[in-house]
């Protein structure tokens, strides 16, 4: 219940993330004052679309529109795809491809997936052992030919 003289605030709209510039640009045409940000926004803004509910989508090269994820949704989607029903614990590169195929987009997708896989305990616990020597091998020559 809201007291008299107070308004309700949707706290999820107050988060500042990478999507805000694109949403402002697509909704109202608001442009940043910095020249470099302005050029980046105008060049990359054509790849994004906004629906009537305010959800930001990115046009993919060969598929449907991908939902742009914010910081609150990123960890859930990464965990669900990496450890979901199949529980295959794939590496960072294949995790990026699976996220795109699932219809999601992150601004810093490669960095986020590498960090997520690096922190996954099960990936490190059951990873194949690498049998490499601790130093380079030295060539041993035989004094007599075989």
Image: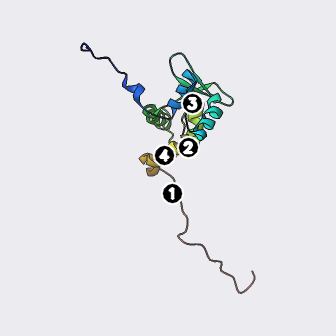
Residue for badge 3: 31
Residue in the picture at 41% in, 31% down: 15
From this view, report whether residue 131 is shown above or below residue 79.
Answer: below
Q: Residues within 10 Å of mark 3 (few under 14, many from 20)?
A: some
Residue in the picture at 50% in, 17% down: 53
- The residue lying toward the viewer, choosing from 15 and 106, is 15
Distance from the alpha carbon under mark 1 to that under mark 3: 52 Å
Tell me the quarter of the picture where residue 59 sits.
Answer: top right
Q: Residues within 10 Å of mark 4 (few under 14, many from 20)?
A: many
Ranked by sequence position, the earlier of labels 1 and 2 is 2
From this view, report whether residue 30 is shown above or below residue 129.
Answer: above
Q: Is residue 146 left or right of residue 86?
A: right
From the viewer's perspective, is the residue at label 1 or at label 3 nearer? 3
Mark 4 element type: helix
Ranked by sequence position, the earlier of labels 4 and 2 is 2
From this view, report whether residue 117 is shown above or below residue 100.
Answer: below
Distance from the alpha carbon under mark 3 to that under mark 2: 27 Å
Residue for badge 4: 117
Proximity of marks 3 and 2: CB atoms separated by less than 8 Å = no
Ranked by sequence position, the earlier of labels 1 and 4 is 4
In the rendered image, the quadrant that contains the N terminus is: top left
From the viewer's perspective, is the residue at label 4 or at label 3 nearer? 3
Look at the image and tell me whether residue 91 can be seen.
no
Ranked by sequence position, the earlier of labels 3 and 2 is 3
Distance from the alpha carbon under mark 1 to that under mark 2: 25 Å
Residue for badge 2: 110
Proximity of marks 1 and 4: CB atoms separated by less than 8 Å = no
Mark 2 element type: helix
Proximity of marks 1 and 2: CB atoms separated by less than 8 Å = no
- The residue lying toward the viewer, choosing from 85 and 102, is 102
Ranked by sequence position, the earlier of labels 1 and 3 is 3
């Amino acid at each position: 219940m809201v007291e008299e003289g107070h308004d309700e605030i949707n706290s999820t709209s107050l988060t500042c993330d990478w999507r805000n510039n694109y949403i402002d640009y697509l909704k109202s045409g608001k442009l940043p004052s910095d020249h470099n940000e302005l050029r980046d926004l105008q060049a990359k803004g054509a790849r994004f679309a906004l629906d009537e509910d305010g959800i930001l989508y990115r046009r993919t090269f060969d598929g449907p529109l991908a939902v742009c994820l914010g910081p609150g949704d990123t960890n859930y989607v990464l965990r669900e795809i990496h450890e979901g029903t199949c529980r295959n614990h794939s590496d960072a590169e294949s995790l990026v491809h699976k996220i795109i195929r699932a219809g999601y987009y992150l601004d810093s997708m490669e960095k986020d997936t590498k960090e997520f896989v690096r922190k996954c305990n099960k990936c490190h616990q059951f990873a194949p052992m690498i049998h490499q020597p601790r130093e380079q091998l030295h060539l041993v020559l035989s004094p007599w030919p075989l």
